[in-house]
Amino acid sequence: MTGELSPIDKAKFVAAKRAAGLVEDGMRVGLGTGSTAAWLVRCLGEMVREEGLKFTAVPTSTRTAELAREVGIPVTSLDEAKWLDLTIDGADEFDRDLNLIKGGGGALLQEKIVATASDQMVVIADAGKEVENLGAFPLPVEVIPFGWQTSQALIEETLVSMDVLGRSASLRMNGDRAFMTDEGNHILDLHLHRIGNARQLALVINQIPGVVENGLFIDICDTVIIGYGDGNVEVR
Ligand code: 5RP
């Protein structure tokens, strides 16, 4: 499954592999989205095919659902599963309090719903995702397409009154078209550089008309499994 991996892929793989070991027969498990989560799905697929692991999987995007089916993991919806034992997902940034920025892959809405419907959320990440302060990675905010420029202007106005360095919000593109989430929404990426009060910012952004959800995951993650390029793994 792995062949010769670059240090970054090795780091993602070893974190994913360790997290896959947390999944036991009969569990209901949320499967994240992104390149690190894809390693997890491949590891779990191998466990299903070769060890007969049986668990209920709830994917957080159509991409993850397709990969899961491809590797032999049957998937179901969150409404069907109702409550999950565990969600394992990647992150774009995590800080020492295990608060996160997510949504680099555009799946933050389903990811947040699935994570908050879980007894435990475990993040898998390469060591480069750890930051002193959240915000160097642009903060994704999902907005409905109707009047998105008004939402963008309101967000930028709001940022002026907050403890953030950057104040611009750009529409995420996919080639020459606006990026579309699985829910048919757009993503505005907020270029903040450093977020002073992530908790407050997350609450304030979600009050703006047109905003569906933002990529700040505050007090949601329980554990981070950090992978290193030399194959070491650290659990926090
Ligand atoms: C997708 C996400 C991903 O978990 C995040 O972007 C990390 O991705 P990767 O593992 O590819 O670095 O939030 O919406």
Image: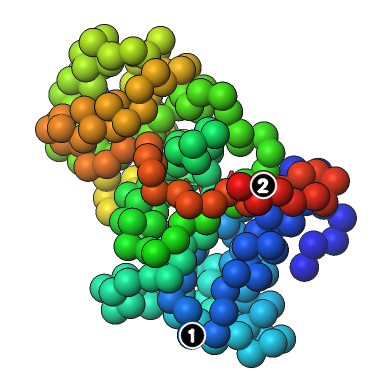
Where is residue 182? Give x, y as percent. 34, 55
Kindly tell me whether mark 2's CB lies below 8 Å from ligand 1: no
* Nearer to us in this view, 1 or 78: 78
**Residue under pointer 1:** 26
Where is residue 105? Give x, y as percent. 48, 45
Q: What type is the residue that disc 1 sits on?
A: Gly
Residue neighbourhood size for the residue with mark 1, other residues' Cα within 10 Å, grouped as few (<14), some (14–19), many (≥20): few
Q: Residue at x 32, y 62 (%)?
A: 117
Q: Is residue 197 left or right of residue 211?
A: right
Where is residue 127? Give x, y as percent. 69, 39
Kindly tell me whether mark 1's CB lies below 8 Å from ligand 1: no
Q: Is residue 168 left or right of residue 23?
A: left
Asked whether residue 168 appears in the rendered view, the answer is yes
Label number found at residue 226: 2
Residue neighbourhood size for the residue with mark 2, other residues' Cα within 10 Å, grouped as few (<14), some (14–19), many (≥20): many
Q: What type is the residue that disc 2 sits on?
A: Ile
* Nearer to us in this view, 144 or 110: 110
Asked whether residue 32 appears in the rendered view, the answer is no
Of callouts 2 and 1, which one flags the residue occurring earlier in the amino acid sequence? 1
Q: Residue at x 56, y 24 (%)?
A: 132
